[in-house]
Image (cartoon, rainbow, N blue to C red):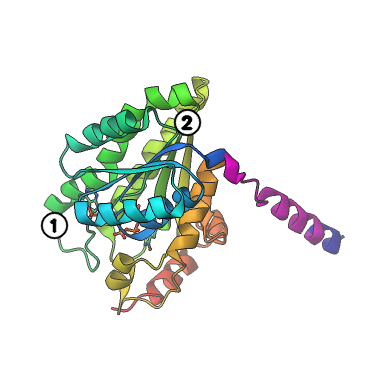
């Protein structure tokens, strides 16, 4: 009986996690990726380019964006342009979104990925920076999504939100960053309900990532923890597939589905394990 149950569990798991992604579904799609001058956003831009999408990317540094755009054209993007903007400026999220929609003639995917510089270490009491990072990592996401919804409604489009395990559970040293990611999950989880209740055809995908080997992340955690990071290029492709297959929620690496599932089962042991994974 137990063996049969185990086999059934494996079959159901394999069915649920089967790859239903059709690369053709992204060919020609009009995509805006934020925070694409480096890191996971840059890797997403390259994957979208290989898949033949039409792209607008954004971040602050024009010289870096220009290089990513050139590479995207080499890789096969139907269109690759950039709009620079600073998401700490409350006027920029909507401006960037409107310019991107004008350049692309519409929008199929809004991929919200950018983050501002996040302090890593014991909480130092800098509440002013909490406000700043909330604008960059959270408020700007709500501004761009709100401005994009009418356009996405016309195209059966999708909002793809790059979030973090730190938006689901807490660890030491990232109080400000974690706060912004909890806010992101709260807002877009609510929006998922409301769009479903309104019969909207816009999908919202929330991607929960574990540690990824971007330069920014590696520089921050050095000396604090030895947790194994996963490759940015793989994470980027995972996010694109999750958005294209209109999943509500997606985890990379896959085992973080279980991390979230078991999160509150044994809180005492969980907290001991977490604290022992970090040096202080
Ligand atoms: P990076 O730090 O590598 O890249 C951040 C991007 O955001 C850059 O393109 C940067 O470009 C841009 N950016 C920074 N500040 C601003 C600003 N004020 N206005 C506009 N753009 C800005 O981040 P990652 O690739 O590591 O992370 C990408 C996403 O993945 C984030 O949402 C993050 O939370 C999530 N994630 C990452 C993990 C990891 O371990 N790396 C783990 C879990 C989730 P520029 O400087 O040119 O503005």
> Does the magenta portion include 59?
no
In the rendered view, tell whether residue 263 sits above or below residue 155. below
Looking at this view, is 237 or 116 the one in front? 237
* Quarter of the figure with the C terminus: bottom left
Q: Is residue 171 visible?
A: yes
Q: Residues within 10 Å of mark 2 (few under 14, many from 20)?
A: many
Report the residue that reaches farthest toward the front: 74
On whether residue 12 falls in the magenta region, the answer is yes
Q: Quadrant of residue 83?
A: top left
Q: Quadrant of ligand 1?
A: bottom left
Instruction: Work out whether 215 lies above or below 279.
Output: above
Name the residue located 40 percent from the left edge and 75 percent from the top edge: 277
The residue lying toward the viewer, choosing from 124 and 180, is 180
In the rendered image, residue 266, in percent from the top left (x then y), is placed at: 52, 62
Mark positioned earlier in the residue sequence (2 or 1): 1
Question: Which numbered marker is on residue 114?
Answer: none
Q: Which residue is mark 2?
A: 157
Asked if the residue at label 2 sits under 8 Å from ligand 1, the reply is no
Seen at 33% across and 30% down, the residue is 101
Question: In which quadrant is the N terminus drawn?
Answer: bottom right
In the image, taking residue 42 as reference, residue 60 lies left or right, namely left
Residue 126: assigned label = 1
Figure disc tally: 2
Q: Residue furthest right?
A: 1
Magenta part, dominant SS: helix
The magenta span reads: 6-24
Left or right of residue 60, residue 109 in this image: right
């Amino acid at each position: 009986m137990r063996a049969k149950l185990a086999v059934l569990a494996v079959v159901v798991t394999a069915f649920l996690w089967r790859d239903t992604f059709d690369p053709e579904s992204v060919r020609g799609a009009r995509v805006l990726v934020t925070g694409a001058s480096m890191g996971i956003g840059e890797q997403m831009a390259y994957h979208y380019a290989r898949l033949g999408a039409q792209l607008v990317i954004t971040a602050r540094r024009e010289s870096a964006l220009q290089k990513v755009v050139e590479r995207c054209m080499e890789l096969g993007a139907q269109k690759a342009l950039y709009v620079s903007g600073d998401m700490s400026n409350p006027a920029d999220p909507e401006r960037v979104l409107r310019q991107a929609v004008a350049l692309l003639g519409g929008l199929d995917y809004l991929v919200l990925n950018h983050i501002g510089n996040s302090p890593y270490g014991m909480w130092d009491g800098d509440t002013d920076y909490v406000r700043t990072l909330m604008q960059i990592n959270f408020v700007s996401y709500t501004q761009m999504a709100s401005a994009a919804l009418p356009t996405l409604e016309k195209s059966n489009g999708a909002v793809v939100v790059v979030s973090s395990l730190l938006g689901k559970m807490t660890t030491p040293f990232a109080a400000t960053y974690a706060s912004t990611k909890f806010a992101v999950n709260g807002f877009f989880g609510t929006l998922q309900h409301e769009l479903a209740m309104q019969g909207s055809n816009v999908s919202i995908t929330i991607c929960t990532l574990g540690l990824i080997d971007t330069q920014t992340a590696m520089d921050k955690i050095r000396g604090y923890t030895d947790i194994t990071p996963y490759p940015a290029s793989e994470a980027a492709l995972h996010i694109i597939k999750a958005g294209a297959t209109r999943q509500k929620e997606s985890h990379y690496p896959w085992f973080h589905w279980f991390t979230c599932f078991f999160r509150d089962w044994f809180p005492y042991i969980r907290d001991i394990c977490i604290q022992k994974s970090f040096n202080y």
